[in-house]
Amino acid sequence: MALRGPAGLGPGSCGPLDEAVAAAEGREALALVATGATLEDDEEDEGRGPGLLRWDGFSAWLHCVCVVGFDLELGQAVEVIYPQHSKLTDKEKTNICYLSFPDSNSGCLGDTQFCFRFRQSSGRKVSLHCLLDQFDKDLPVYLKKDPAYFYGYVYFRQVRDKTLKRGYFQKSLVLISKLPYIHFFHTVLKQIAPEYFEKNEPYLEAACNDVDRWPAPVPGKTLHLPIMGVVMKVRIPTCYDKPGTTQIVQLTQQVDSHISVILPTVHEVDLFRCFCPVFLHSQMLWELVLLGEPIVVMAPSPSESSETVLALVNCISPLKYFSDFRPYFTIHDSEFKEYTTRTQAPPSVILGVTNPFFAKTLQHWPHIIRIGDLKPAGEIPKQVKVKKLKNLKTLDSKPGVYTSYKPYLNRDEEIIKQLQKGVQQKRPSEAQSVILRRYFLELTQSFIIPLERYVASLMPLQKSISPWKSPPQLRQFLPEEFMKTLEKTGPQLTSRIKGDWIGLYRHFLKSPNFDGWFKTRRKEMTQKLEALHLEALCEEDLLLWIQKHTEVEIVDLVLKLKNKLLQADREHLPVKPDTMEKLRTHIDAIILALPEDLQGILLKTGMT
């Protein structure tokens, strides 16, 4: 029998959680040692699930909160990390320090909000509990957390203060999180940062205590999140949502008197505001992002650079952008040398920069977007032109898209007319963003549907799945075979845009985005095959099978079936609950049919 299954659960693995907020039994002592946190037996916090440790609720949303100030002798310095047991390496602290302040050339007076992303230190241990992993499986692929990166959400204040030697008060409140919920965390900062600058640490501690009482970030649920007297109503999307829809709007027809803020999205940026200076070239930029081309966004401030980079990454949704992207990147970043070297071709990454130094350092990059100040909603900036790279000498160069790239697809004049008409009619930026987002969504879907259709054909037929053999393998992806399918079932079925679609596909198949997309699809399909294999096993009369086999073979079967159950739990295989229950019943029945000494041994063998 060729039943396959893991030998056992590794030290870092975990089973499924029946309750979204239930903590794994037995890790409490470990977490206490690791964090110095304490169990609050006396305090029954509203919103914190039974058995959860102090700060578990907080950790589901945030890694920590930092306050970064300016010291005349040290420069930028982390003044506060909260909760105090939060772990950051020296390298991570240095990155946070430099990324939390605008470049001195930006001249940001008043309050500024922006976002950055930085690489997690390699020595960091993976979190003990698997709460976030459990929620991750129901998220759309582009919202799944990347274990190698942190996001930093910044609220920076710079105001004149004659009492200080420097003449200015300069401080940033920074939320560090694994979650890419840009709009949500910027909204949280808007609620708490202005008051924090007036009231300092006690206020911050109270705000963090509120976050610790929040329900877990479960996709698909409407969540009410109170913070410092304000209640936010949000819904995190799921992978089962229809792309392009916003569920929260449908849920809020009735007025909730206690709700202060309703967020229609947790992650989206104002797409039209960001693409406004370049909307004539939005289709070309979509191609560059889709193909994972190296792109630099040169902007006057971190707000503009981070919003534009995030809008670019967002424009190929529901596809995930699989390469690295840095919404705000500085010369002090730990990857500065790696990304600016001329000894090799620029990497597949999107960088947002503000320092004039980058105009010289990155002038060898193939695609540079130079933008001016983003206008408030309702104003339309002058449309920038596509220019040759040799014309970019300094950051003082005029705004424009500097590239020699020739798009594969013809420009869609319809969307340009639609957006221009909206500008003339003073259509709100939100409405323009909806039009642009729908356009990008339809373009991406037209491109990806033929690939989805072909990859689905690589799946073996269900009748080829035998319970007594290993699950069959997927057929190999053959680029030329795929190209032949485009003649009859290509993007022309769903898109009006003409051009060299074949050339675009050939280029895409060599890109990191295809590699990431195909690995994800292959994993999903392999898991589906494993799940179908489990279902086939459940339909077999296993008691009849054991009558014809030796004790050694029966014990081997039991161990492999148990491993199958463990695999289904650990990998979240798409198995129906009654299939799992049937298999457990089969295992119990087989064990009871064995001699008593073997029963005792097999019943003790680990199962979750």
Image (tube, rainbow, N blue to C red):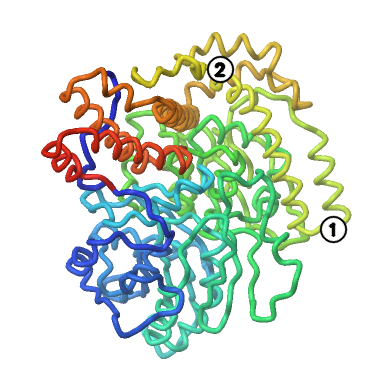
- Is 478 on the left-hand or right-hand side of 272? left
Residue at the image point whose x is 61% and y is 31% from the top = 287
Residue at the image point whose x is 47% and y is 87% from the top = 198
Q: Between marks 2 and 1, how big is the CA–CA gap?
A: 47 Å
Asked whether the viewer can see residue 109, the reply is: no
Q: Is residue 514 above or below residue 357?
A: above
Q: Is residue 199 above or below residue 22?
A: below
Neighbour tally class for label 1: few under 14, some 14-19, many 20 plus, Cα within 10 Å = some
Residue at the image point whose x is 39% and y is 27% from the top = 537
CB of mark 2 within 8 Å of CB of mark 1?
A: no
Rendered image: mark on residue 457: 2
Q: What residue is shown with label 1?
A: 426
Q: Secondary structure at mark 2?
A: loop
Which one is in front, 46 or 561?
Answer: 561
**Dot 2 amino acid type:** Ser
Q: Residue 343 sits in which quadrant?
A: top left
Give the image location of residue 165, x and y in percent: 36, 84
Q: Secondary structure at mark 1?
A: loop
Give the image location of residue 279, x and y in percent: 71, 43
Q: Residue 242 sits in which quadrant?
A: top right
Asked whether the viewer can see residue 13, the reply is: yes
Residue at the image point whose x is 39% and y is 69% from the top = 58
Q: Is residue 460 above or below residue 15?
A: above
Give the image location of residue 314, x and y in percent: 58, 45
Which one is in front, 70 or 514?
Answer: 514
Give the image location of residue 115, x and y in percent: 48, 59
**Dot 1 amino acid type:** Lys
Quarter holding the N terminus is: top left
First in residue order: circle 2 vs circle 1: 1
Neighbour tally class for label 2: few under 14, some 14-19, many 20 plus, Cα within 10 Å = few
Q: Residue 338 sits in which quadrant?
A: top left
